[in-house]
Image (cartoon, grey):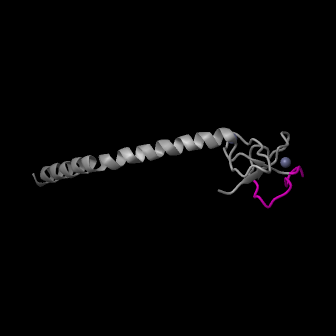
């Protein structure tokens, strides 16, 4: 996951709006030195240089949570596929019969 930088000058137009590349050093608009920021669109919280994360701790936790839920959902879907497949087949047959009439 690539880290992003942002302008933390709250009076700047790029503040909470523009994500800079890691290689960028300064804000193109106001010249403020860029800091690593949380990639969450509504967060933009500064992340210390020595923390090699793309998101702030809050959003790391949130994303982990979501990922776990997604895995669980995928497991549920996986076991439900056969049942759903059966319904679709039956449904299609019914449609075919209806069309022939
Ligand atoms: Zn700026
Ligand atoms: Zn965040």
Give the percent coordinates (x, y) of residue 90: 18, 49
50 or 22: which is nearer to us?
50
Question: What residue is rendered at 85% in x and 42% in y?
Answer: 9
Q: Which residues are magenta?
A: 20-33
Residue found at the very far bottom of the displayed protein: 23
Q: Is residue 3 left or right of residue 7?
A: left
* Magenta-drawn stretch contains 23: yes
Question: What residue is rendered at 64% in x and 56% in y?
Answer: 1
85 is higher (above) or lower (below) than 9: below
Q: Is residue 44 left or right of residue 60?
A: right
Give the percent coordinates (x, y) of residue 98: 14, 49
34 or 57: which is nearer to us?
57
Q: Is residue 30 left or right of residue 74?
A: right
Kindly report the secondary structure that dominates the magenta region of the rendered protein. Answer: loop
- Number of labels in the image equals 0
Give the percent coordinates (x, y) of residue 19: 74, 52
Question: What residue is rendered at 70% in x and 40% in y?
Answer: 43
Give the percent coordinates (x, y) of residue 69: 48, 41
Residue found at the very far left of the displayed protein: 101
40 or 98: which is nearer to us?
40
Question: What residue is rendered at 36% in x and 46% in y?
Answer: 77
* Magenta-drawn stretch contains 46: no
Residue found at the very far front of the displayed protein: 50
């Amino acid at each position: 996951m690539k880290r992003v930088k942002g302008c933390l000058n709250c009076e700047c137009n790029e503040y909470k709006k523009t994500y800079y590349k890691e290689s960028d050093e300064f804000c193109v608009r106001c010249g403020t030195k860029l800091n690593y920021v949380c990639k969450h669109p509504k967060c933009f919280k500064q992340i210390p240089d020595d923390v090699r994360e793309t998101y702030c701790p809050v959003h790391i936790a949130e994303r982990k949570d979501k990922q776990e839920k997604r895995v669980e959902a995928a497991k549920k879907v996986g076991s439900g596929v056969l049942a759903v497949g059966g319904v679709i087949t039956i449904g299609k047959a019914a449609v075919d019969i209806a069309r022939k009439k």
